[in-house]
């Protein structure tokens, strides 16, 4: 941090207002002043006024003007502190409430796939109806970077192992499986050998997808490489491609779904597995809406112990 940034932070600490913190975090999360205003229930001029006050305190603009509200270098330097402060305020307000329920706040959740994450979001929304929840669907690599940049608060992602610079909570384990058309010749057998895959066109996710990474790393470990015939940027596209007869799809078993056009084949001579992890910054894991999300996940999934994944909210508070 250079001298200018230190000076800006010092001035900010002396004149910061909670409304400015909430407005800043809402604009970061939603990408525009108008969407931020809608999310926090105020007018757009009110958000503009709060951001202007924040910029006066910081000594410079925190958002670029025109088009999407992108952070300036000054805004980027303040992002982590203001996100943490926003959640700390929500945490304190929750403790000051008449019950343990959080009475206000917001939560940005990243989902690598809806099959594990959506039941958790449903349970959380029912328990904390006053928390405004927004979701972002992306592949695992993109969501890890979003959590690190704090453009999402918490994410449920597929990983081979814990992301060691973040808080991790193992929710479930998934196995790589093969998706085939319902009339495929191996349907009655229900399984397939890796050698048989070499003769089949494969449909796979884009690079950056953890499903693809787990599959390719598993193949590399046994000295096998299978080049895909097609790659698509979503699991839904992979499923449609398989249903249309373009090839066999690489999926995780919990993502196979119940489409009657498709069947799931088990790989009988290899077990490529990955974990579904809840990840967030260590600084947020015990605070406000994020801390409540972590505890909701513990209750819902009751994860098994795994080295590197057993940080507790009590230890982080």
Image (spheres, helix red, strand yellow):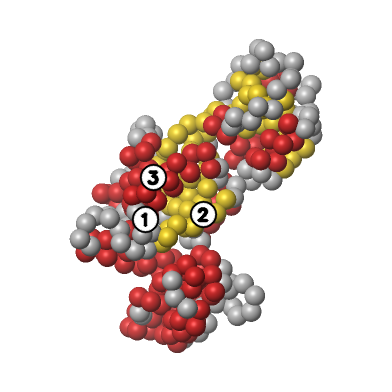
**Residue at image mark 3:** 123
Across and down, in percent, residue 261 comes to 69, 28
Q: Which mark is residue 129?
A: 1
Q: Is residue 11 left or right of residue 246?
A: left
* Residue 280 vertical placement versus 8 (above, below): above
Label 1 close to label 3 by CB (< 8 Å): no
Q: Position of residue 18 (x, y in %)?
A: 35, 75
Element class at badge 2: strand
Q: In the displayed structure, does residue 61 sit left or right of residue 269?
A: left
- Name the mark nearer the viewer: 2 or 1: 1
Q: Quadrant of residue 232?
A: top right
Q: Tell me the number on the disc at residue 135.
A: 2
Whichever of labels 2 and 3 marks the residue nearer the N terminus, that label is 3
Q: CA distance from mark 1 to mark 3?
A: 10 Å
Percent x, y of residue 65: 60, 80
Circle 1: element type? loop
Report how far apart the C-alphas of labels 2 and 1 lie in the structure.
Answer: 15 Å
Q: x%, y% of residue 69?
A: 58, 73
Front position in the image: 141 or 153: 153
Q: Is residue 257 visible?
A: yes
């Amino acid at each position: 941090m250079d001298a200018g940034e230190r000076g800006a932070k010092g001035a900010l600490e002396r004149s910061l207002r909670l409304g400015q913190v909430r407005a800043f975090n809402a604009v970061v999360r939603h990408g525009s002043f108008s969407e931020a205003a809608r999310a926090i229930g105020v007018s757009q001029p009110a958000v503009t006024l709060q951001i202007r006050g924040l910029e006066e305190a910081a000594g410079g603009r925190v958002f670029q003007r025109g088009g999407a509200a992108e952070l300036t270098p000054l805004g980027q330097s303040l992002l982590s502190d203001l996100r943490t402060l926003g959640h700390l305020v929500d945490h304190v307000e929750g403790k000051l409430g008449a019950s343990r329920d959080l009475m206000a706040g917001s939560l940005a959740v990243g989902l690598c796939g809806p099959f594990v994450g959506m039941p958790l979001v449903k349970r959380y929304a029912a328990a904390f109806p006053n928390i405004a929840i927004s979701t972002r669907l992306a592949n695992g690599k993109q969501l890890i970077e979003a959590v690190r940049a704090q453009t999402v608060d918490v994410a449920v992602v597929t990983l081979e192992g814990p992301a060691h610079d973040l808080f991790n909570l193992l929710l479930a384990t998934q196995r790589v499986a093969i998706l085939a058309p319902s009339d495929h010749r191996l349907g009655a057998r229900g399984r397939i050998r890796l050698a048989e895959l070499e003769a089949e066109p494969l449909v796979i996710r884009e690079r950056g997808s953890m499903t693809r990474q787990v599959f390719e790393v598993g193949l590399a470990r046994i000295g096998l490489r299978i080049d895909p015939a097609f790659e698509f940027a979503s699991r839904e596209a992979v499923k449609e491609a398989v249903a249309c007869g373009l090839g066999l799809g690489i999926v995780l078993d919990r993502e196979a779904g119940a489409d009657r056009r498709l069947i799931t084949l088990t790989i009988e001579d290899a077990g490529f597995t990955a974990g579904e992890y809840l990840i967030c910054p260590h600084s947020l894991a015990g605070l406000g809406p994020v801390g409540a999300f972590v505890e909701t996940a513990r209750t819902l999934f009751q994860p098994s112990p795994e080295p590197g994944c057993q940080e507790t909210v009590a230890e982080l508070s």
